[in-house]
């Protein structure tokens, strides 16, 4: 089976690669992540993904164009949609991976996004399957989340750079802004209060 594995980063690729190889499949890694900000972070993750591929003896290709302007043009309007910017981001990266796979003779594809315990798993799964059907290749689905801790342990053993946020400028703000976190806690408390009132 000729499989393209979209890689969001090096550490998130550790367990998926191990699991895929246990199935007797030798994937090609593919880096396409226009959401990552700032440039130094994007470049570090690209270099780290390439380092992981080399250490793991896995073929690797990458889109090496930094696309933050394109990302912001898509992300800001998506803020006001029902599914939001994360859905836009999943859609963009997954469709690009499927298109690349179809155009370069791969039988199937997957993504290390399915390793993350923080992402919207079912939404990503539906999106990946939709584009697989559209481009006429198969979607290799595996819930890699079961290997979350194992993947962390492998990445530490390999001394890979481990990031502290998903990559986008909005995620960075949510990760580091005390004011924003306070507002979110306040909003969550209010939502909980309203739910309790509705149940009374």
Image: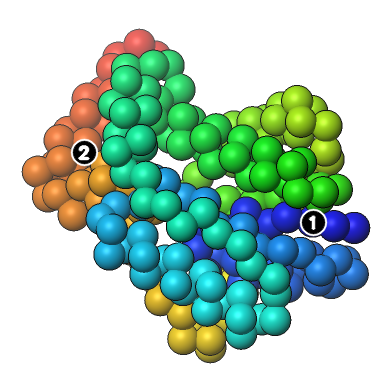
Residue at image location 42% in from the left, 46% down from the top: 34
Residue that numbered label 2 is attached to: 185
Q: In this view, does 131 lie to the left or right of 150?
A: right
Q: Classify mark 2: residues with Cα within 10 Å, few (<14), some (14-19) or many (20+).
A: few
Q: Is residue 134 above or below residue 26?
A: above
Residue at image location 61% in from the left, 35% down from the top: 95
Q: Which of marks 2 and 1 is nearer the N terminus?
A: 1
Q: What element carries label 2?
A: helix
Instruction: For residue 194, say whether it is visible.
Output: yes
Residue that numbered label 1 is attached to: 3
Towards the viewer: 1 or 15: 1
Residue at image location 29% in from the left, 38% down from the top: 69
Residue at image location 81% in from the left, 50% down from the top: 106
Protein image colouring:
rainbow
Q: Nearer the viewer, mark 2 or mark 1?
A: 1
Image location of residue 109, percent across then percent down: 75, 49
Q: Are marks 2 and 1 in contact (CB under 8 Å)?
A: no
Image location of residue 153, percent across then percent down: 55, 80
């Amino acid at each position: 089976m000729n499989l393209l594995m979209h890689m969001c980063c090096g550490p998130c690729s550790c367990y998926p690669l191990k699991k895929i190889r246990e199935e007797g499949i030798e994937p090609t890694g593919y880096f396409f992540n226009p959401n990552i900000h700032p440039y130094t972070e994007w470049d570090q993750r690209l270099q780290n993904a390439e380092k992981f591929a080399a250490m793991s003896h896995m073929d690797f290709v990458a889109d090496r164009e930094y696309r933050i302007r394109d990302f912001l043009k898509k992300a800001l309007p998506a803020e006001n949609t029902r599914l939001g910017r994360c859905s836009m981001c999943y859609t963009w990266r997954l469709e690009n991976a499927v298109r690349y796979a179809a155009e370069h003779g791969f039988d199937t594809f997957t993504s290390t996004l399915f390793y993350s315990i923080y992402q919207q798993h079912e939404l990503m799964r539906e999106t990946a399957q939709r584009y697989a059907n559209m481009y006429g290749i198969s979607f290799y689905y595996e819930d890699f989340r079961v290997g979350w801790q194992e993947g962390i342990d492998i990445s530490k053993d390999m001394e890979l750079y481990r990031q502290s946020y998903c990559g986008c400028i909005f995620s960075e703000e949510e990760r580091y802004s005390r004011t924003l976190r306070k507002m979110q806690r306040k909003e969550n408390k209010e939502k909980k209060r309203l739910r309790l009132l509705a149940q009374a």
